[in-house]
Amino acid sequence: MGAKINRIGRALTLSVGAFSFLASTPALAAKQPQQLARSSKWLMDYDKDACRLAAAFGADHDSVTVFFSRFEPGDSFFLDVAGERFNLGPVEPKVTVEFGPGYAPQAFTPTLGANGKTPMLLGLRLDLMGRSESTRTKEDPPPLTPDQEAAVTYVVIRSPGRTPARLELGSMRAPMRAMRACMDDLVRTWGLDPTVQASLSRRATPLRSPGEWLRSADYPGPMMFKGNQALVQFRLEVDELGAVTNCHIQGHTKPEGFADLTCKLIIKRAKFQPALDAAGKPAKSYYVNRVHWLIPD
């Protein structure tokens, strides 16, 4: 993530995967959305530890750029959007996202950031049906079919005090197919077989809550004094015994120091039940998540 964080929040949160999925907010549903046609081709960025799909919509002051970021195989992704309409000021906004046709709007409290000088909303995790991320202790929702992906043709983004934007995506069949191909290639670069990983009978599962891996006392004093906060996306390598053998930073906001500290502490404290292959035998695998470093009141 090259985006610069402007503000992440007020309360200290050192838990992992802390994006909350909220009910739809009626107050954001009043204005009719402005339709923005896609003004660029879909572009796929094969990052060293992520797959990012991006496209631009509209023009000039009304333009919006959308980024779909996937850090592991599956249907969910992080939806980041940049545009002047997302200059929402210092308040914590409630933003709704609605894929269509036919899927209910879902509300989020996003992280506010910037793509260069352009305001940006970060960290909206969902899939093309608007479903929230499933936790690793619950059964995953049924995977999306290519026909379901093809049927999604737009997304409406509503934010407080702004005209909603309806982004005309076009059929998402080909973009999502490209995303899956990118993820298979990425898993191979991790030294893993994507077919084996897709057929695991159990994922690598934390023995304790990931929220216990980081503590309030871990917050670096100089960072707190300066008011620095951060968001860090990471991937752990987990061996057949459930031990963490490595930690990779998949993306992070500035300043740099939080990324190295996150990996150092998680390698020290995280323990797992190992993944099991389709035959029930322990297998090497991975665990992906993200951390919010937020300054307390």
Image: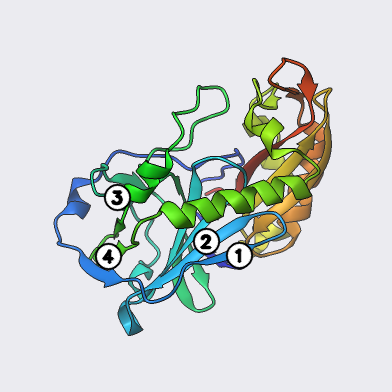
| Residue 23 coordinates in the image, percent (x, y) | 29, 38
For the residue labelled by badge 1, is the local secondary structure a helix, a strand or a loop? strand
Mark 4 is surrounded, within 10 Å at the Cα level, by few (under 14), some (14 to 19) or many (20 or more) other residues, namely many
| Amino acid type of the residue tagged 3 in the rendering | Glu
Q: Residue at x 53, y 29 (%)?
A: 135
The CA distance from mark 2 to mark 1 is 6 Å
Residue 260: x and y, percent?
78, 53
Label 3 or label 1, whichever comes before in sequence order:
1
Camera-nearest residue between 111 and 77: 77
Label 1, on which residue?
Answer: 45
Check disc 4 and report its element: helix, strand or loop: strand
Going from the N terminus, do you reach mark 4 or mark 2 first? 2
SS for dot 2: strand
Q: Which residue is mark 2?
A: 53
Mark 3 = which residue? 98
User: In 3D space, how far apart are the residues under numbered discs 1 and 4 (Cα atoms)?
Assistant: 24 Å
Q: How is the image coloured?
A: rainbow
Residue type, label 4: Ala
Q: Which of the two residues, 150 or 229, is positioned nearer the viewer here?
A: 150
Which amino acid type is shown beneath numbered disc 2? Leu
Sequence-earlier tag: 3 or 2: 2
